[in-house]
Image (cartoon, helix red, strand yellow):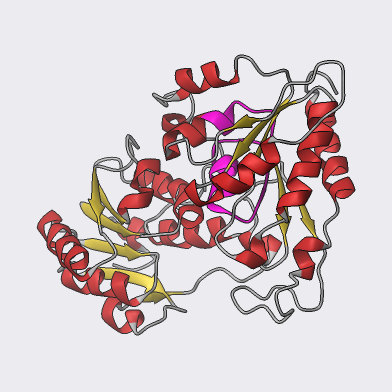
Amino acid sequence: MSAGTAEAGVQPRRIGIIKLSALGDVAKTVQTVRAIRRVHPAAAIAWCIRPVWSGLIEGNPDVDRIIPVPRSLRGLIHGMRALRAFRPDTILDMQGLATSGLLAAASGAPNRYTWQSARELSGLLTGNPIVPGPRDINVAECNFGFARIMGATELPTDPPPYLTIGNPAAAAMRDVLEGLPRPVLAMHIGASEPNKRWPVERWAELASYLVGQGYGVIVLGGGSDRQAAEVVCRCQGAGPSQVNPLMMAGRTTLKELAALVADCDLFVGCDSGATHVAALVGARVVCLMGATLPVHSGPFGPQHRILYLGLTCSPCYRRPTCEGRFDCMTGITVDSVIAACREMLCARGAPGT
């Protein structure tokens, strides 16, 4: 198969998607798979993914089979066998690492594609490298290169219905929001790397201001963020209709997270998986970034606001040179985040602004 598949009239019948992790990358792949489904409605599509992130794609009508690949040798062998049993004729390795390359090679698919920049020898295992998008476009658009190979011409931008109006967790999350004043802001305080995090005391100061203005505040994060989230929730606001922040860190499934942030008036977070889930479901996002490049790694879509200082050492990715100061994040002031939040809320015409 080549980039001219659609024109040649060759139709893939069984497509294997390999995007194992992490959450943000999975979120930025959902629309690419959706685009593939639109041009190949009769094809069977399987998605290889880490079990910890599979909740985000459960119930996705564009995916016929989810193949969990745990992070272990036994898990890899299980994934290889399951993918081969699926009998794909086309593999799209969007991970580009050794594990995904082994999965692709073991699949038996005659047509296998991966990134030109694939690492850990995965390109040799997969074959047929494609040219990834340049660093000056978003990862979501880079991923769409795989859909183009399959004949797609347009990347969907509307939120996937299975995560919003069709999300079984939506009703329960509306109940969670019921007692909070509007506008409601969701603050996700976590991130995978220390150089992507904003200091906890800044989050607490931001929460104090928002509560003092009479806004509803939800504090989100992973299980490891609970202690920090509790500190943020103990903030003291001052205002006529003060309602304490709602502590939800570590208390939501991925589907619940998607439903919750979709119904909030604004989402504030760093470069984390939750931020990209929020963008996927149509939330307006204020994103604090420093260690990664906003145009490439930021939330996808024009409706977001990114705060980025653009220091000479940025982006450093996983190799910071600041000896743990993380100037790119600590330099983002609470006042600048407040201003961005107010601007976004006013632009939306949210109640109480």
Q: Position of residue 196 (x, y in %)?
A: 65, 62
Q: Position of residue 6 (x, y in %)?
A: 35, 56
Q: Position of residue 183 (x, y in %)?
A: 74, 23
Residue nearest the viewer, comparing 198 with 81: 198
Residue nearest the viewer, comparing 45 with 308: 308
Find residue 97 and report its image quarter: bottom left
Find residue 127 and report its image quarter: bottom left
Q: Which residues are magenta?
A: 260-284
The quarter of the rendered structure image containing the C terminus is: top right
Find residue 177 and report its image quarter: top right
Note whether residue 305 is visible: no
Q: Residue at x 52, y 48 (%)?
A: 155
In the displayed structure image, the side of residue 315 where residue 141 appears, left or right: left
Residue nearest the viewer, comparing 344 with 325: 325
Residue nearest the viewer, comparing 245 with 285: 245
Q: Residue at x 40, y 64 (%)?
A: 94
Compared with residue 128, is residue 17 higher up or lower down, i.e. above or below?
above
Compared with residue 229, is residue 224 higher up or lower down, i.e. above or below?
below
The quarter of the rendered structure image containing the N terminus is: bottom left
Q: Residue at x 53, y 35 (%)?
A: 159
